[in-house]
Image (cartoon, rainbow, N blue to C red):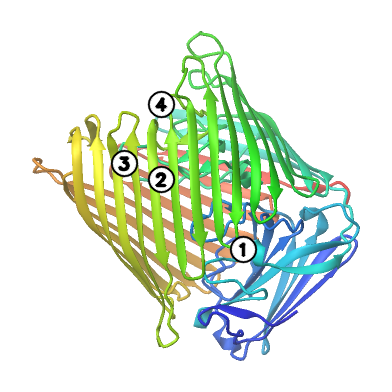
Amino acid sequence: MSGFWQQRPGEGAPSTQQTDVYIGYTDTTLYIGVVAYDDNPAGIIVADSRRDASLDNGDSFSFIIDAFRDQQNGFVFGTNPVGIEYDAQVSKEASGAMSRGAGFNLNWDTNWQVATKIGEYGWSAEFEIPFKSLRFGNADVQSWGFNFKRTIRRNNEVAYWAPISRQYSLSRLADAGRVGNISAPRQRNLKITPYGLAKERNGNRIESLSEQELGFDIKYSVTPSLTLDMTYNTDFAQVEVDEFQINLDRFSLFLPEQRPFFLENAGQFSVGVSREVELFFSRRIGIASDGSQIPIKAGARLSGKVGEATNLGLLHMQADEVPGIAPQTDFSVARVSQEFDNRSSLGFLLVNKEENGSLDGGPDHYNRTYSVDGQLGLGDDGLLSGFFAKTDTPGLNGDDTALHLSAAADTQEWSYSASFTEVGKNFNPEVGFLQRTDFQRGWLFALKRWRDPSWKHLLELRPHIAYRGYWGGDGLHETGFLHIDNHWEWKSGFEIHTGVNLLHEGVREDFELAPGQVVEAGDYDDEELQLVLMTDDSQPLSFNMTAKIGGFFGGDRTQLTPSLRYRIGETFNARLGWTYNEIQRPNNPEKLEINVGSLRMTYSFNPKVSLQALVQYNDATDVVASNIRFAWLTSADAGFYLVYNETRDDDVGLFTEKRREWILKFSHTFDVFN
C-alpha cells in the first residue's frame, strides 16, 4: 500500500516522500512493514528512544487497527527510526477538538516487537505483533479497519494513507481504510506474571523499616475479544510519583491515574466529564486521601467485547484494612455499553463500595452509583452525548442526582460545542471524582481554523471564544470564565497564543489562599492577559512559556510557567519546568510569592533500558522530593526496577533529616501456551 496524503502543511496534497506499507501474517503473528523513503536521509530527526515517548517531535510511523470495524475502538502502534515501541488504546474515537484526550490511553501496553533500519533510501521498520496481543471477532475471514500515519519532522509534514481532515487525528476511525481477507486464528492466551519486591525506609528519626512482598498477575483470553485479568497482592512500586500542583482556588485538584492495572481498558469504564465529574475514578481504590498507598489484597477484571458491538467491563478489588485510616473495603464496578452505527452508543454503569467494619465503631458504610449514558452521531461531524446518574449513600437523601448533556460539531474549518451539567447537593460518588459539588454549569465554545495557500510561513490561525459558568445550588454565580484567543501556528513549528480572559468569582465564605492571605466572601470581577509561546520541539533545545497577567480575586497576579527542554540525540532528554505566582491582595501590603519547579532527566541506553530522575520543589510547603528509577524491561509489562525516593520537608537546609526509600522489584511474564 502506498499513496499517502498530507494533512499538514499542504492539506490534500500528495506526501513529499514515498511511503510503502506491507501487511502479512502467520498462524500466530501479524506483520506490518514500512519503507519510508527519504531523498535527504541526513535530515531525518530522531528525538527519543524511550517506550511510549512522543512521536510528534521527530520522524515517525504509526498506525491504528479497528479489528471490529465499529469506528469507535482501536489499538495504536508506532515507532521511529531507532525502534521506539509506542502503543496505545483508543475508545469512543478519541479524536477531534472536543475530545480532550479522554479516550486515548497511552498507558496501555502489550507485547510486540519492532526492528528498524536507517539507510541511503531513508528508513524502514518491521512490526511483529502476536495475534494474542490484539482483540478481534470470531469470524474465520475478517475485514479490519486500518490507517497509517507518517511524520516527516524537518518540514512539519503529517501524511495519512486514508486522508483525514485537519481537525482530526489518527484516532478518527470513521475515516480509516479497510483491509480484507484476514484469517485471524483463534489463540489460546494465558500469561502469568509473578513479582518479588524488597523495600527499605529510613529517616525522620525513625528506625529503618524493611519489607518484602510477593504477588502475581494473570491474564487469560476467554475469547479473542474478552480478557480476564486477576491480581494478588497488587503492587505499583515502579509507577512514577505524582507531580506537584498548586491549588490557588477552593475546589479539588485532579491527579491522574498512573497504575498500569487500572489503566488498561480504562476508557471502557469511563463515564462523566473528564476531570470534573467522573463517576468512576480508580485512584479511589488503594490510595488514601493524602496520597499514601493502601494495600490491595486481590482483584479481578473481565473486559472486552461480547459479540460484535457489546462492550462489557466487570471489576472487583479488595483493599486491605489500614488501622486509623481505612477499613477493609470491597470495590465493584459493572459496565455495559451497546454500540450502534455512526459512533452512537447506549451504556449503563454500576459502582459499589462496601466497607467491612468502620473506623468509628458505627455500622458498615456503603456507597453506590448508578448511571445511564449514551451518544448519537449526527452526520459525519456532529455528536450528541450525555449521562444521568444517581448515588445511594446512608444519611444522604434526595437531591442526589447528576445530569450532563452536550452537543458538538467538528468540521474542517469550524468547531462548536455546548454543554450543560447539573450536580445535586447530595450527589456523592465516593469511588468517583467531583471537582466541586451542588452546582449547575454551562459551556459554550466556537473555533475557526483558517489556512491560506498564499501564506508563505504561517500555517494556520485559530481564533476562538469559550465561556464556562458555574452557579451553586443557592443561585450564587460561583465562577465565570470568558476566554477570547487566537492561536498563530507557523510552518516551522513555532506557535504563539494571544488571549484575554474575563473572570468572575463568587465566594460564599472566607477561605485561606495561603497562610496570612484570606479571600473574603463576596463577588470579584477581573480581567487578565494570557500569552503562550512555543518553539519547535523537534530541535535539540526548545522552550515553552505561558504567562497570565491581570486581576485575581480583586487583587493582581502575575503567573509565569516556563518550560525548557534539551536533548542529545535520542538517548538523553531533560525538561526543566517552573511555575511562578506573584499575588498582591487588596488591602494587604505583603506580596504572596509561590514557586513550584521540577527537573526531569532521562537517559535511554536502548528502548528497553532507561534511567530517569525527577526532582521537584514546592516553596509553599517547603518540600523537596526526588524520584530516581532504573528500568530494564523484559516485556511490555514486566522487568527489573530499582527505585529511590527521597523527601525533605519543613526545611530545605543542608542538615535537614531526610526520608529515604529504596525499592527493588523484579517481575517476569510466563506465556503458558508458548
Mark 3 to mark 2 CA distance (whole Å): 16 Å
For discs 3 and 4, the disc positioned in front in the rendered view: 4
Reading the chain from its start, which is encountered first: label 1 or label 4? 1
Q: Residue at x 40, y 40 (%)?
A: 253
For discs 2 and 1, the disc positioned in front in the rendered view: 1
Mark 2 to mark 1 CA distance (whole Å): 40 Å
Q: Quadrant of the N terminus?
A: bottom right
Residue at the outermost front position = 379
Query: Which residue was labeled with disc 1?
Result: 172
Mark 4 to mark 2 CA distance (whole Å): 38 Å
- Quick check: can you spot residue 252? no
Reading the chain from its start, which is encountered first: label 3 or label 2? 2
As drawn, the label of residue 638 is none
Q: Residues within 10 Å of mark 2 (few under 14, many from 20)?
A: many
Look at the numbered disc 4 and give the secondary structure of its residue: loop
Q: Position of residue 245 (x, y in %)?
A: 37, 46
Query: Which residue was labeled with disc 4?
Result: 425
Q: In the image, what residue type sits under mark 1?
A: Arg
Look at the numbered disc 3 and give the secondary structure of its residue: loop
Mark 3 to mark 4 CA distance (whole Å): 49 Å
Front residue (pair 163, 38): 163
Relative to 47, is 110 on the left or the right?
right
- Quick check: can you spot residue 423? yes
Query: Which residue was labeled with disc 3?
Result: 655
Reading the chain from its start, which is encountered first: label 4 or label 2? 4
